[in-house]
Amino acid sequence: MRSTVAVRDLVAEVSVAPAELILPLFVREGIDKPIPLSTLPGIFQYDLESAVKEARRVFSTGVKSFMIFGVPAEKDSRGSRGYSDDNITSRSIAAFKDEFGENALVMADLCLDEFTDHGHCGVLDDRGCVDNDATLELYGRMALSQARAGVDFVGPSGMMDGQVGYIRGALDSAGFTNVGILAYSIKYASGLYGPFREAVNVSIANGGDRKGYQQDFRNVSEAITEVELDIAEGADMVMVKPAGMYLDIIRSVRNLVSVPVAAYQVSGEYSMIKAAGVAGYIDEAAIAYESLVAIKRAGASSILTYFAHRIDEILA
Ligand code: PBG
């Protein structure tokens, strides 16, 4: 049963197809050519035009879904460039929809950390703590701005309580019933987001962290509670993040729910494989493939991964 490629391919239980992947793309306002990211080798911040060009190239390899992360030219305490009329995320969504129409899915991160000068995922109260409900109101504005630009799925990633229900309500009451929600339901307070913070120019004020609103990685049951709440609030897909060190969580969620389960192979997961590959310790493409298969085997239907930009070489 293992002697030839043909028989191994015949009986393989899990495969990875480009159409199951979502490519994250950083689109930065105020630049005119791509800027390489030192902590995410091979990944860039793009200006609008080069982002579309890169998406076109990756689309030609079979990847059909994109997750846009807008990076503003200026930040303020309320993250207002995240929901102002001409915000970079919505402009990017419109440009992608112009380019691809219905042939690709355009998703967008819906969070304030890329836009706030203190780097938190929401606005702060007088004591410097994230104000959950005031933040929801701004998430509602972001959702409507992204919906008007033509987004297919919004991806709320800020871990505010009630965010999925609030955003669903805002979208529905403005007539955007067809805009889906890919909920970052399970998001652990992980050290693996380190390289991402360079990608969106975020540093959290006063050496702070997100442990007050992201999940403790020692816990399993609260992950299940989060998923159940998000589905009840209207999530169309739920996501587990990070992926590779949380395969048990992906499996538990898969067994529990009937909506599609996505997993986010985050920046640190990419960078570790990349760095070991560059150092010659491992074969980058082989380990990238193995990591994606593992995430699929655990039960994910789709994977958000930086490796999507070179999936043709990885699957070759
Ligand atoms: C929040 C957000 C983060 C990531 C995706 N959305 C950062 C965080 O929560 O600290 C991390 C993704 C990655 O590491 O690749 N907007």
Image (spheres, rainbow, N blue to C red):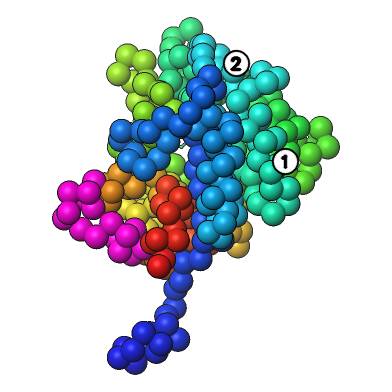
Nearer-the-camera pick, 76 or 28: 28
User: Is 170 drawn above or below residue 83 in the view shown?
Assistant: below
Is 286 magenta? The answer is yes
Tell me the residue at 69%/48% (across/down). Answer: 100
Amino acid at circle 1: Asp
Farthest residue, direction top: 126
Rendering quarter of residue 53: top right
Nearer-the-camera pick, 66 or 120: 66
Amino acid at circle 2: Ser
Observer-side mark, 1 or 2, equals: 1
In the rendered structure, which disc, 1 or 2, sits on the residue that comes first in sequence? 2
* Secondary structure under the numbered disc 2 in the rendered image: helix
Q: Callout 2: few (<14), some (14-19), or many (20+) C-alpha neighbours within 10 Å?
A: some
Q: Callout 1: few (<14), some (14-19), or many (20+) C-alpha neighbours within 10 Å?
A: few
Label disc, if present, on residue 144 of the rendered structure: none
Left or right: 46, with 244 as reference point? right
Residue 161 seen: no
Tell me the residue at 79%/39% (across/down). Answer: 176
Left or right: 279, with 4 as reference point? left
Q: Name the residue tied to disc 2.
A: 80
Image location of residue 267, percent across then percent down = 37, 42
Image location of residue 197, percent across then percent down = 38, 29
